[in-house]
Amino acid sequence: MNQPDKLDFKKILPIFVIILVNLLGLTIIIPLMPLYATTFGADAWTIGLLGATYPIAQFVGAPILGRLSDRYGRRPVLLFSQLGTLIGFIVLGLADALWLLFLSRLIDGLSGANISTAQAVITDNTTEKTRTQGLGLVGAAFGLGFVIGPIIAAVSLTVSGDNYHVPAFIASAFSLASLLLTYFWLPESLPAERRGQSKRRAFSFGALSEAVRHPEVGLLLVLIFAQQVAFGGFEQLFSLFTLNRLGLNAAGNAGLFTLIGVLVVAVQGYFVGRWSREYGDRRLVFGGLLALALGLSLVALTPAQAAPWYDRAALAEELSRGGAGHTNEAATGDIPVTLPDEATRGWAGLAWLVVALVPTALGGGVLQPAINSLITKRIEPDEIGGMLGISAALLSGANAFAPLFGGALFQAFGSTTPFLTGGLILALLFVAALRWVRPGREEQAAAGLARGRGGH
């Protein structure tokens, strides 16, 4: 039986909407958390630890829930994880002490198998020909979320007079909506006869080690971790970089993040499916590594030239107020970057950076869906949920490690070093992938299908 060449959007639409609604809650919170923590007197190190709490907890929780989704079905695990996210956001909204912020992120992280389970649902509803495009829609939902979520956060803070509890409750409302959509709209995608076939433990570090040693997907799991260290460090440190090089404030950075989000939506929502069918996932991984290596290197070399509208005194005043409308010493601390000189103002630095963001967003948008799609095509069907859970755990580990690693480089050697280091790491991985990621059974199957068609 020939597999369909086009994605069945009717089957994918419910999970896409659910992912998007769920991510709106997350992306409303992301720009809020550092400022929220400063209201309880948190210093920069504590804020960094708070940022690492969610991915570290998810590193443990996602593989367990991924294996459970193989045994008991995708829908109950997705409902459970969304309930945890809802509780986490409610705790965040009610928080009156710093430890409650940590508790909220811990609860959300431990139950945070939303994305890996959603990827498994998409895998259940796609063929090998359409899987990369289907998984790319997860990234497109991320892109839309990162465009819309911060806007909702900004509007809610403005309307509420900078009440940080309000965005948290709005995020919980989106999380509740996601849970209800899953309950009433999403059918179970894993047939009963395919559940419980895997005899592996839900998760252990031995299982993680075994997965990394897998001859077909081990290097792919290393790639998913390493590319996220590079790209995650870029996302975490980008605002500090543009503050140092271009003198951009929060509004200016929001505009650039919107541009990145639009590019990622275009790549993952449309182009990645076409490119996968035309070139195959393996070549797509090669292209993504090369594009991201080039993009990060170009970002690192952005000329140190302030934007034309840059006003050093006004920006220093904004930073001293911590963006909260009033002076707050706990919010400012020691700014870890030097502001640019007004005498350097011009368009060259900003123009260079905008151009550099194109290959950066292209590579960052392509790699995760292409690598995860390739992984699912090189393992047995009953291991898909668990292996995607391990992939998500590695991504969470990378998200926890990236700001610590990149921040240390930034502080010790300057703003250029983290991005140049990321570009170099990806260039080396590109060479390694060319050598060791060989054609797999998915390419052999495609070649056999092509020969069969040619014989008719």
Image (cartoon, rainbow, N blue to C red):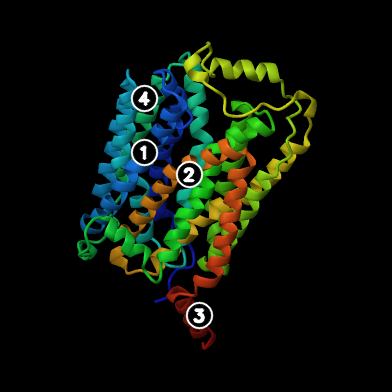
| Upstream in sequence: badge 3 or badge 1 | 1
Q: In the rendered view of the protein, which quadrant contains the N terminus? A: bottom left
Image coordinates of residue 307 in percent, x first then y, are 73, 30
Tell me the number on the disc at residue 54. 1
The residue identified by callout 3 is 447
Q: Residue at x 65, y 31 (%)?
A: 244
**Residue pictured at 65% horizontal, 20% vertical:** 315
**Which class describes the residues within 10 Å of circle 2: few (<14), some (14-19), or many (20+)?**
many
The numbered mark at residue 169 is 4
**In the displayed structure, would residue 448 be above or below residue 392?**
below
User: Pointer 2: what residue?
Assistant: 402
* Of callouts 1 and 2, the N-terminal one: 1
Badge 3 marks a residue whose secondary structure is helix
What's the CA distance linking mark 1 and mark 4? Answer: 18 Å
Left or right, 74 with respect to 138, comes to left
Helix, strand or loop at mark 4:
helix
Is 61 or 362 nearer to us in this picture?
Answer: 61
